[in-house]
Structures are given as structure tokens and as C-alpha cells.
Image (spheres, coloured by chain):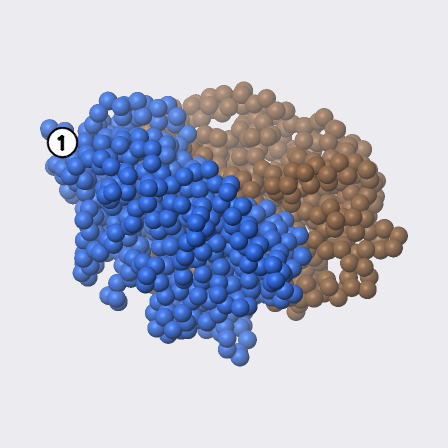
Chain colours: A brown, B blue
Amino acid sequence: MPDPTTFETHPSRYKHWRLTTSGDIATLVMAVDGDHPHRPGYELKLNSYDLSVDIELADAIQRIRFEHPEVKCLVVTADLDRVFCSGANIYMLGQSTHSFKVNFCKFTNETRLYLEDASGSSGLASLAACKGTTAGGGYELALACDETMLVDDGNSAVSFPETPLLAVLPGTGGLTRLVDKRKVRRDRADVFCTVAEGIKGKRAKDWGLVDHLVSRTKWDETVAARAKELAAKQTVTRGPAFALPALEPKVTPDKITYKFVDLSFDASARTGNLLVKSATDVDEKFDGSVEPWSLRAFRELDDALLRLRFDYPEINVVTVRTSGTGEIVKGCDERLAKATTGFAREIRLLQRRVMKRFDNTARSLYAVADRDDSCFTGSLLELALGADRFYMLIEGDEKVAVELSVANTGFNTTSTGLSRLESRFYGDKKQLDKVLARGTEGPIASEEAEQLGIATVAADDIDFEDELRIAIEERASLSPDALTGMEASLRFVGPETLETKIFGRLSAWQNWIFTRPNSTGEHGALTLYGQPERPQFQWKRT
Amino acid sequence: MPDPTTFETHPSRYKHWRLTTSGDIATLVMAVDGDHPHRPGYELKLNSYDLSVDIELADAIQRIRFEHPEVKCLVVTADLDRVFCSGANIYMLGQSTHSFKVNFCKFTNETRLYLEDASGSSGLASLAACKGTTAGGGYELALACDETMLVDDGNSAVSFPETPLLAVLPGTGGLTRLVDKRKVRRDRADVFCTVAEGIKGKRAKDWGLVDHLVSRTKWDETVAARAKELAAKQTVTRGPAFALPALEPKVTPDKITYKFVDLSFDASARTGNLLVKSATDVDEKFDGSVEPWSLRAFRELDDALLRLRFDYPEINVVTVRTSGTGEIVKGCDERLAKATTGFAREIRLLQRRVMKRFDNTARSLYAVADRDDSCFTGSLLELALGADRFYMLIEGDEKVAVELSVANTGFNTTSTGLSRLESRFYGDKKQLDKVLARGTEGPIASEEAEQLGIATVAADDIDFEDELRIAIEERASLSPDALTGMEASLRFVGPETLETKIFGRLSAWQNWIFTRPNSTGEHGALTLYGQPERPQFQWKRT
């Protein structure tokens, strides 16, 4: 395998951003170091970005939430004179595998949704201060901020040049954010998305593409004033501050080991095994003095999921097991729910984000409860409810069981806005209520869990091992593409949201377009970008 | 060009279905004639279907609505002993171009939605009576019916074998209908979609995959009794009966001419020109004695759109013009809205379906008002509101204008459930109300239409022609794939529904999967179906 991807970083090690805070304002300055791309082979000119830039952005947003609770507004800006951000690096895209491109876009989308989540739930507003060209993914980043300020210098424009220049889509949520979030009229959005040079000045403001238009001379003071105003509007308080410690997993070619999470692989079988362990004691403090299990375990899970996506593309099926003591997980969930600090709220929000990452991971996920110390309780039961299937072993002494906690009763929503239990019993309120009521009465052993609809399959030890083995082997033998499309359709029942539109509709179209000769073929526009040769298109519409 | 596709047929000419009616029950018997496929090169064995089978099904549903108002329940069944329907013909799919496959799936999806529309709005329930194997698209057809009855013979199963056997999705709405319409638990849906042989008997019923399980001995009487019960529940009455006359367009390689619709092509420019003409007199009667313009013109438009999709795949941009007398269109719309017959309601529902077909047509649509007799009024204004852009010429005497009618005020919804005006002003209720209020005060000339946000661009005659010409040339030069993805994202702002999930999420994934080597490559599962060679998969997940 190639070098493992490291998603952990720290502001002191950033190559592409500078993070500073002053009072209730944080400023994140994009200053991409062209000579330090994620992989060799291209230069990150003009504040174009790649995965390494995105990893730092995700880290910065997370750290501001946990480590700088005093910050109420984040200003995202750049230090180039005429450029805010020119979007994803085209040469990087041109050189990447399809699998990498798709996962890169997904990670970028998730990071942008986290900006919106920080604003919606964490009292952290954001202002994109675009003092120059704001193109493609750069404009998509601006759209993810609460407000966008564009310099009015007769030159600087916002643009989505992807379709005219590269024959692909603005694929990190831009199309959806234009019409659904910002309510740009759809015929204007159509015009905007085909004008490679973009739209500037008064028209950009009139069309709702930007919120503020500011001259160069008044730029700094206006940005500062607006950031103050946005900060002053925030009512949610975070804190106390907690400095996120490094995770530092042990990584070997076939296993990634954290404190509470193991992810191992059988490359020849195309399978992975995820194990999440409970704490050994109930989390007591949410005051920033220690890192609770509720935070640590989910941060580790998050890191493991990202490594799985990027570094193990041929793993088709992942079994998900848990171990430990259900009572402890339940205790952790209850303490966390009752804790009134902003820090505790941040942990709950992080758990929710990590579980969404789990749902959006394009691997077949089979949860398996077959150990005496299996521990699908509360926040760990969410793993089983988010998985495609849940296999439970029936034991005579009913040691294998699941248990509900407060973590299953509503806060932990999927991208659709439904909880995982609501998704499972979509359209069957009676059964949902029955399960929730039963949940207050203690552990539910395998046979009953199957009857209630929590387990997909419960089997006794005569059949269990064979049934599970065959199910995994069969799944691992199926086409990964068909499985991805199938899972993306079945996992997100019910209402659609901005998030599901991004991951379901927009990403699905972009996946298709990325595979088409018109973009990535020998004569495709993405392939030939920056070269004198003009792309040649196949003209058939679909 | 190849032979034009004919979408018109008549029960007397059906090759693949037998339509009979008896009292308030119609029976549509699938009896596919294997020797008459849509194109030579494959045999339609075991009630597998292709476009020719689907065209007849669409015709039958339409005719029952208009010509058999007494029918309250449609029984869809088959005359083979052990097979209901084995789904889309795999060899046909394997031989088809990508463009054809996608349009075939889209048409099939539309027809299935029409079954649901007939049940929801027209007092025509449907019962799928599956007396044998019900596989793939055959089961998707059953899911589109109100209820599904499966024979309990120890052998007959419902199944989605697409993913395990062909490495594609159940792509005509099946995945969405399983979890969103029928509320099958998503983990069970996951199991069901990977078991090639399907699920039969009690388990099929317990899982909600079918509604009724009936033995062979009681089959006929139970089907008849349940159809009677469904018919008795209907409260919407249709009629009087109207026999749909043939459209019989004149078709040449570069023009299709109907009574009220012209569609011409400039193949070298990859452009098409659609013209819809108003009636010469206001429709007076909705009693079935004559065919009103409101019906005829939209049936012609529907036929033209289907021919555009299937027979002119390289046409990238279509301009949409109207001509005639706005007052007459307005009169037609008002008479139609006020008419109390079921026939009038059927016409309104047909107009709504045709306009959805327009929205779902993967071509760039530019509405153009540049003629003195331009007639974007009411039901014809919907064309401009559904288009990607609307160009209007500013004339001194304000002859070029648009006008609202009752057809723009809510009934004519898109797949999202919003009207086209609501879509245009999504999130801007104030502007929507302003436009609706202004609509009651007569024609709106180009300049005002632009100010109100109805026109995308209004320009005077010095600039108009050049601006439009350049816009069309530029659009026609862009990648058709990127445009399809872009338009599919921008056209459907706001809420998502079963329909938009089918066309946006499920179809987008299927489009992608159809292009992947794992299904359609040299060693792909779809390519190798029926051959001894095993498919070879590329294992990378995305």
C-alpha cells in the first residue's frame, strides 16, 4: 500500500493556512504553500487546494470549536492580493484515480457541512472575506459560510467555471447551495454556472451570489465590523476549552490500532473488521480537564473511517463489532446528555458528525454481535442501526444483547434529519414507540432484538458462524459500484435535506460525470486542462 | 438517422399486452411476444420487456383514464403459467447505447409514476396480480401498483437480482419504492436486493414486499374479489369517455410537424427548435364530443419530447417558442379549470404530466419570446418557467409579453410538488406574491418581465439576436454530460419527493453504474450475462 494518509495535524504544523484568534474573532488565512501538495506531481498555484489543504481546514474548524470557545465568528480569508481561492487543483484531479476523486469531494463536502453545523449548533458564525478571484471550490467554500463578502474592485468575481472549462460539476455542494441554501433564482444559477469568468460587482450582489460588496479601501474595517456583528448575534456558548490531544494510532499494513478502536483488514478477502471498545469507567467530567471516552472513542472512529476510505479502497465489506461493558456506555451517554457545559454539547455534536461520516462511507457495513462482551449499547448501538445489516448470535444465557440509552432517542440524527431508530422504522411509528418503550426496560437479547426489528438476523450457534461467513463472502463478491449505489439509496430513507441532496443527488451525478470521456477521457476537458489541445466531446445526451 | 420511434399505438395493435374491461375492472395481461422486440437482435423471453412493451403499457394506462371512465381498478397480470414478468430484457440492455439505456429507464419510470398518478388523482386503483416469478423491473412494476398479490405455490418469488447478477441497480424506482413507498425496513431491503433468487411466501408478506399471498386454487376468485374491493373504494369519477385520436405527425429527418407543435432540428449546430401554437378558438366543450386544444397540444408536445429524447440524442440545446393569441390560451385555461367533468380533470392531469416530462428531459431548454405573436400565456408560460432560461425581446410597442392564467397558480406542479412559479421564486414568497398579484392585471411586457424575475434576459433588438445566438452556440459547445448533471441539480430546487428521488438520486447512481466496467465493460456482469464466462470486477470502492 502507499504511505498511509494522516488526517491529524495541528495549527503549529499547518502548511496552507494560518489560524489566529483575537477576542471573539478567529481568522483563518488561506496561504497555500504550492510546494507542499498532498502527493508529488503538481503545484498548488493561486491558492488552489488538494486534500492536504482540506485536512488542515477540517482540523482548524474542529479546534476552534473545542479549543477556542471564546470565538464566535470565524473569518475565512486569504493573503494573496488578487485571489481568494481558485478551487480544487485541476492537475491533482486529472492525476487522481476515480476512487480518490470521489472520496476527496466527499471529505471536502463533509468539512463544509461542519462549517454550517458550527454555525447552526455551536455559536460559531463564519464570514468568507473574498478579496479577489473566488472560483470553483473556492466559491463553494464561501457558500458554506454564513455570509460572503466580495471585494468591489472591477475585477474580482465569484465563479463556477467547472462546467465550461472542465466538463464536470461544481461538485462540493455548490449547485445545491446556490439554489437551495442561498435561493439564487434557478435560471440565474444556470447562467452563472456556464460563465467561466464568473460574475462580479453589483450583479453578483443583485443575484444573491454574495452578501456584501466592499471596496478595497474599506475592506479591512468592513470585514472586521461585520465579523463583530456576526459574533455579537451568537447565543450558544461553548467551553470550557479543551485541547484535542493527538490520536497517534499504530498503523501497520493490515491493522490500525487506537486506544478504543481497532480496524483490521483481510486484503485477500476484501474485508475489514472494525472494533469499538467501551470505556473502563463512566465518564465523570465534562469540564475540559480530561478527555472523556465519549470524545476520544468517536474521534478515533472518525480517523479510522477516513483512513478506510482513502487508504483501503479495495475493502468491500466491513464488519462492525463492539466490546466492553454496556452499563458503562450507558452511563457515559447519560452523563454526557445531562452535562450542561458547552464542551459536552460539542462532544454530542462530534458524535453526531462522526456517525454521519459512518453512514456516508461507501462500504458495506455489517454489524455483528457475537461476543460475550459485545456492547451495542446507546451510542455504540448507533453503529448497528447505521449499518446495512445487524447479525446477532443467540446464546442460551442471553449474554449477547443490545441496550438503548438516551443516545438513541433523537439527538443523533442522520443526514436526513431522522434518528437512526426513526430511519429503521420509517413509516411505522407504532413499532418505533414499542422499541423506545422496551428500551427503558433494560437489555434486549438477540432473539427479542430480531423480533423487535433491531437485529436483521439472529441465529443460534449452530447456524450463526456459517450464515455470517456466507453473507460476508457473498457481499464481498459483488460489484463495488452497484453496492455503492444501492447503499446510497437504501440508507437514506425519508426526507431529503441539503446534506442528502449533496451526497445523494449532486455527488451521484458528479461520480458519473467523472467517469465520462468528455471529462476524464483522453480528449476530455479535465484531462487536457492547461494544454493547448482543445477537448473533443462525444455529443450524445442521455 | 435510424427509423423514428413511434410512441403511438392502440390496443387493437398491441403485441405484448391484452387489455379487456368488464364493468369497473380493467385487466391488462402481459403476454410479451418474444419475436417482436423494439429493435432486432434479441428475443423477449419469459415476459421480459423492452421499449416496445413499455410503450404499449403507457398507452394502455392513458387510454383507460380517458376512454374507460367506468374502470375503477386495473389488474395487471400475465398469462404465463409460472412467470409474471422477468424484468427488462438483459440482452437488449447489453446491446443498447448508454443514451438509450438511460432514456429507456426514464420512460419506464415515468410510466410507473403515471400508474401512481392515476390512483392518486383519477380514481383508478391498480392491483399487480403476480402468479409466478416477479423479477427486477417486473417487481418494480408491481411496486408501482397500489397493491401486490403473489401466488403462494412454494416457488414464486419477488426479486431484485440486478445487483448480484448484473452489477447494476433495480433502476426504475425499485429501491426508493421499497423503503420510501412501501416502508420495507432498510436492512431487510438490503438483504432482499442481494438475494438473486428473491423472497417468496410468508417471508415476502412479513417483510412487506407483497400485500397478499394467495394459493393457486383460490387465485382467480381472490384477485377478482380484491379488485372489486379496490374499485369500490374509489371516490373520484372520470368521464365522459373520450377516444384519443391518433396524432400522426409528419416526420422528416429535420422536422416533426403536428397540428399545434413543430419540432425542427439543426443537426450540425446540435440545436432544436420547439414551437407550440395556441388554438384558434377558445375550447368550449369538455364533454368528450371534441378534442380540446388543451388536450391535443399537450399530447403532441408529449410525443415530440419523447421523439427528441430517443431519436435525436445529439441535440444539446432546444429553443422553445410559442405563437398565437394569448387571450385564447387564457380562455382555454380558464374554461378548463372551471369545467367540472372528469374529462376536464384528466386533461389538467395530462398537462401536468407532460410538463413534468419536459422538466425531466435532459436537454438545455431556452425559452425565447421574440415574435409579435409570441404567446407565453398561462399553460404555455409554464414552458418558459420550466426552461433553464427565458430570453425576451424588448419591443417599442410592447407586443412581446407574457401573461399569467389560472394554469400558473398551483395545480401544475413539478416533481418536487412546487408549482413552476414557486420553484422560480423559491424562498422568496414576497416576490412570488408580487408576481401572482401582477398576473391578475394583464400582459407583462419584456422589460417588466425581467424586472419581476420571469424573464432571465430581456434585450432590445440591437442586442437581442446576438445575445441569444451566442448563448445558444456556447451552450451547444458544452459537454452534454456536465449539462445533464447541472440541469438535474438546478431544475429541482426545494423539497424532494418519491419522484425526484427516482430521477435525481436513483437514476444518477444508475447512470454512473451503467458506465462502469463492472457492469458494461468487456468483462462486466451485464455484458457477460447468459454466457459461461464469469464477470471480472475492478474492486476499488469509491
Quarter-of-image position of residue A365: bottom right
- Name which residue lies at 34% across and 30% down: B409
- How many labels sit on residues? 1
Element carrying mark 1 = loop
**In what quadrant of the picture does the C terminus of chain B appear?**
bottom right
| Structural crowding at the residue carrying mark 1, measured as other residues with C-alpha within 10 Å and reported as few (<14), some (14–19) or many (≥20) | some
- In the image, taking residue A276 as reference, residue B235 lies left or right, namely left
The answer to whether B528 is drawn above or below residue A242 in the figure is below
- Name which residue lies at 71% across and 27% down: A341
- In the image, taking residue B459 as reference, residue B239 lies left or right, namely right
- Name which residue lies at 53% across and 73% down: B535
Q: Give the image location of residue B40, x and y in percent.
A: 34, 73
**In the rendered structure, which amino acid carries the disc numbered 1?**
Lys
- In the image, taking residue B403 as reference, residue A373 lies left or right, namely right
For the question of whether residue B152 can be seen, the reply is yes
Q: Give the image location of residue A193, x and y in percent.
A: 34, 43
Residue most extreme to the front? B23
Which residue occupies the foreground of this view, A305 or A367? A367
- Name which residue lies at 72% across and 62% down: A468
Which residue occupies the foreground of this view, B386 or A13? B386
Which residue occupies the foreground of this view, A354 or B285? B285
In the picture of the structure, the residue carrying the numbered disc 1 is: B399
Q: Chain of mark 1?
A: B
Quarter-of-image position of residue B378: top left
